[in-house]
Image: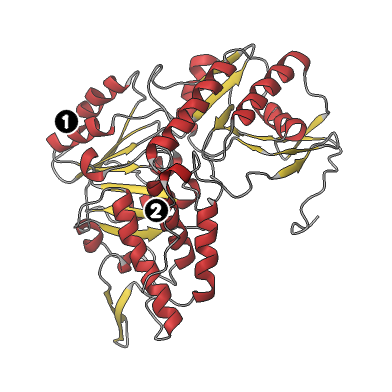
Amino acid sequence: MTIAIPPARNTTDIPTVPAVVGARLSVPLVTGERIQYANLDHAASAPCLEQVRDAVDELLPWYASVHRGAGFASQVSTKVYEQARDTLRRFVGARSSDTVVFTRNTTDSLNLLAKSLPRRTSVVLFDTEHHAALLPWRGPNVRRVQTPESTAAAVPALEAALKLCPEGPRLVVVTGASNVTGELWPVAELAAVARRFGARIVLDAAQLAPHRPVDIKALDVDYVVLSGHKLYAPYGAGALIGRADWLEAAEPYLVGGGATKNVVDWGDHLGVSWSAVPERHEAGSPNVVGVHALAAACDTITRHGWDRIVGHEQALLTRLREGLRTVPGLHELSIFPGSDRVGVVSFTIHGHEAGLIAAALSAEYGIGVRDGAFCAHVATRRLLGRVDATEQRALRASLGLGSTTEHVDRLVGALRKLVTEGPKWTYVQQDGRWAPADDNRPLPPFVAA
């Protein structure tokens, strides 16, 4: 019994990249016009792929309980849920022995792994990490390595930190692509260092997996974590994929139905035996819709081919970075200047508040970007200090499958106008954020006024 998205067409008929829902979304401007939305905020949450939406629509009539029902719809939902594990394994090149635990997102996955570490595990990570990878590991056994000057410098920096770790279990935490700058980290080289010191390594692939292929065996990492909402499947599912032994030895940090094999009332206490992994760490009713959506996204990207996807994004990235160099006072943030990156660019514009620029781009030009410290406050503020120590926020434009040449050109042109001519509208601060004054743009009918 299989529910699958339709097979791919002949490659000669395949568009350059998979289509996203909302590609022709029209949004109102404060000036009264409407314009096609330019979504340049893929790094925060990517739009839904059309194939993912279709896969979810196909499943919904069959939606029922997973692992718990005898009805035919429950059997279908259970089959869909379990076959998604194989899809995720293939997508990240997992070993046959690796387990796939479905979670809510990357944050959930890393917190789960943190709760599953053996006692006295030493954890080593770089302070450039996103909060999801930075905050779950705290205490005397955690070593934070300061931002290296280059990808080459990251390798000896990790080696020096591992030399200081006491005997016992060790875990290295590393991102694949920076949440702030999109720059790629030397994961395979860092994994080789970890191996020399008997350490395991977890790869935060939240920003990497939507843009580049991930291969657990080729990179020689022990765990990979990722999020559906960044992978064009915004239905609330993520995954932790990797070695099962630490997870098998740990009690679940979320307890409830599904995580338990048997519960016995002993009068003064309850006797509990836990399910095996992965069910042990998937308490509650599984998110079969989200998991199916995530698997459909992985299948779609794999069938379409990475060459097309990477080529599309890199062409737009080159165009974007060349255009940004023409904006007066603009400074691009970089951890490793000159290194390879996915389609993410963060920057400041001297003398202009990032929040005000972001608000004006949205209200006057129909462009969505991110402003702030990108849930990576330590990394972002250190990078801002390299440019201007007084800056506290930056702008981030991030590309993806929904991005077009027109979006890139519109952003560059809008930034030049805002810098040279200023906003056309009046803006005020509301709850610490800039917003257009007297904003009467109508909301969609499903949003309460």
- Mark positioned earlier in the residue sequence (2 or 1): 1
Q: Secondary structure at mark 1?
A: helix
Residue 385 placed where, x, y %?
Answer: 50, 18
Does any portion of residue 75 appear in the rendered image? yes
Q: What residue is disc 2 on?
A: 299
Q: What residue is disc 1 on?
A: 163
Q: Contact (CB < 8 A) between labels 2 and 1?
A: no
> Where, quadrant-wise, is the N terminus in this rendering?
bottom left
Look at the picture and state if 228 lies above or below 374.
below
Does any portion of residue 389 appear in the rendered image? no
Q: Residue at x 41, y 17 (%)?
A: 337
Closer to the camera, 163 or 322?
322
Three-letter code for the amino acid on which mark 1 is drawn:
Lys
Q: CA distance from mark 2 to mark 1?
A: 41 Å
Three-letter code for the amino acid on which mark 2 is drawn:
Asp
Closer to the camera, 5 or 145?
5
Q: Residue at x 58, y 37 (%)?
A: 41
Q: Residue at x 38, y 60 (%)?
A: 102
Residue 449 placed where, x, y %?
Answer: 81, 55
Pointer 1 local density, CA inside 10 Å: few below 14, some 14–19, many at least 20: few
Q: Residue at x 21, y 48 (%)?
A: 120
